[in-house]
Amino acid sequence: MKAIGAVILLALGGLPLSGPAFAQAKDKAPNADRPLLATFCDAADIKGSACSRARGYRSGKRCDVKLQPDRHSGKFLADGSTLLVVNYGSGCEPHATDFGGAVIFEQKDGAAIFRGYQPGFRANDCIILARNEKQDRLICITGHLGQGHLESGVAEMVFTRDFSGNIDVSLNYFVRAEDATGAHGSNAVDCKETSVYFGLAKLGAGPGRDTVAVDIAYADKDTIATACGKGFPRPKDILGELGPGEAYVPPGHEKKARFVIDLTTSQAVPEAEFGKR
């Protein structure tokens, strides 16, 4: 999933989508995308999973929206309302918003209503957890590549309804990581730091309530001390120079382990140590 930041979700009215069609869309059944697209696109503009002229998108512009396979359904609002989050791509979106975002639908009174576009928000690599009996949580790995830096994080996609009925979406981050190999030819650390996360993968449910597990590539205190003490060989393909007080951790010298993240405290600990707490 990629998300750039909190973006207000447009509360655009749309045609209702029947309950069975909504269920088909959630299950990715054949032809499920056409009824979804029909809530914001004229029939003549629909071809397969794409709309060539999405209504209400980027005022004054003719924009395409192509629905993608990634989609998640759950009771993501505090009032227990069910939302369907569907990823899309669009030629109207730049690299800054990863060339697309997510379309949001709300199921209400047996129908699903189009609730707008969320440029820059993508629900990839996600899991759904129960917050309580009334509400679910959508937890995802986010990612964005810019200037050779791959930024990622484990974050909750938070949905709220404002006083006018609009639905707002924001991200609540638990951990963040940055891989600088594309910028420097190697990952880098600040010698004043005690730990650095480079990459996140394989998000899953954790061993306890309000926890998730994720694979993390990282440098711990000893790794950083070795890098700053010139204990690692200098990478061959260096792109530019590091700043004062920084050092390289060449590919293959980072550590990797599965961590458990406590969603209440945002603390991440190795899975092997979590059971000892």
Image (cartoon, grey):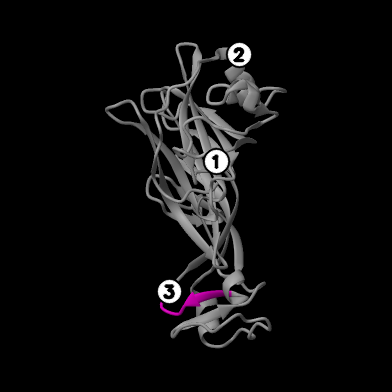
What crowding class fits label 3: few (fewer than 14 Cα within 10 Å), some (14-19), or many (20 or more)? few
Residue 236 colored magenta? no
- What's drawn in magenta, residue-wise? 187-193
User: Quick one: 19 or 12, which is closer to the camera?
Assistant: 12
| Sooner in the amino-acid sequence: mark 1 or mark 2 | 2
Q: Amino acid at mark 2?
A: Pro
For image coordinates 33% across by 25% down, the residue present is 165
For image coordinates 51% across by 61% down, the residue present is 177
Badge 2 element: helix
Q: Which residue is mark 3?
A: 193
Q: Which residue is mark 2?
A: 20
Q: Amino acid at mark 1?
A: Ala
Residues at badges 3 and 1 in contact (C-beta under 8 Å)? no
Q: Is residue 160 above or below residue 185?
A: above
Q: Position of residue 50 (x, y in %)?
A: 65, 33
Q: Could one spot residue 59 in this view of the protein? A: yes
Q: Amino acid at mark 3?
A: Glu
Q: Is residue 239 above or below residue 257?
A: below
Q: Which residue is mark 1?
A: 123
| Sooner in the amino-acid sequence: mark 3 or mark 1 | 1
